[in-house]
Image (cartoon, helix red, strand yellow):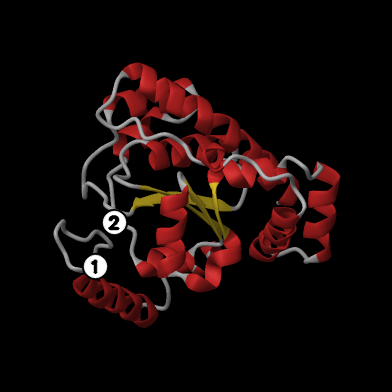
Amino acid sequence: MSDMAPPGMTRRELRRRAEMLRATKTDAGGEFAPEEREQVRILMVCTGNVCRSPLAEITLRARIQDAPVRVHSAGTRALIGKPMTADAQELAVEHGGAAPDADAHRARWLLEPIAEDADLILAMSREHRTSAVELAPRLLRRTFTIREFARLAGAITDEEITRAADAAGTRPRARLAAVTALVTQQRGLAPPAPLEDDDVIDPYRRSREAYERSAGQLIPAVDEVARVLRAAL
């Protein structure tokens, strides 16, 4: 069963579809093969899932391709089945992403099973972060905007990250959970930043300059996430 929801579905219909997806996943013994179940799952979230979140997904995947990590994305109001915009595809490749990944991307709706399965949710804005937490409240402490996560993680050294991960054992998902908790602790310690500094601007249907400005906010955050993952895993 596809995890893509058609446009125009009501919230009740989306909830019912999510329940069906969860039941199918349980009956099938899980979405992942046994050797993949310990893979860390990182979910990028934006609105249409054609610009920001796939750009984050594809560029992060390229930076950590040897790590036991699955990076994917979804949209709160996804343009179901649509590819990345041309400008987003070009920027993904320019910033190190694989061209086949950019070309193959198709937008999908953010549904409850997708959110609940994630070990770490990185949203492109505070609005998207709220939407993800509403779907999976138990993941509140694992859900950030990507720029917020990068800002908080910037105060933590590689050595501190590795030490926290080592204390959690050898399982990748447990190691990331320990490091995510370490980053979460920084929410009360780091100096407050202007709220808009935690968002990545939306370039959809805007100029190439807007796309480049958006990427200029996003890519440094992707690089910081990659640093954390390399130190943790």
Residue placed furthest toward the left: 8
Circle nearer the N terminus (1, 2): 1
Q: Residue at x 66, y 41 (%)?
A: 151
Instruction: Answer above or below: position of 190 versus 59.
Output: below
Q: Is residue 131 left or right of residue 178?
A: left
Residue at screen point 35% across, 28% down: 88
Please name the residue shown 55% across and 37% down the image.
Answer: 197
Residue 39 occupies quadrant: bottom right
Residue 8 location in percent, x, y? 14, 59
In whole angstroms, how far apart are the C-alphas of marks 1 and 2? 14 Å
Q: Is residue 38 visible?
A: no
The quadrant holding residue 114 is bottom left
Label 1 residue SS:
loop
In the image, taking residue 78 as reference, residue 181 lies left or right, namely right
Relative height, residue 137 to residue 217 (above, below)? below
Say which amino acid is labelled 2. Trp
What's the mark number on residue 109?
Answer: 2
Whether residue 190 can be seen here? yes
Mark 1 surroundings within 10 Å by alpha-carbon count, few (fewer than 14), some (14 through 19), many (20 or more): few
Please state which of the two labelled residues, at mark 1 or mark 2, is closer to the viewer: 2
Using the image, determine if residue 20 lies above or below residue 157: below
Residue marked by disc 1: 1
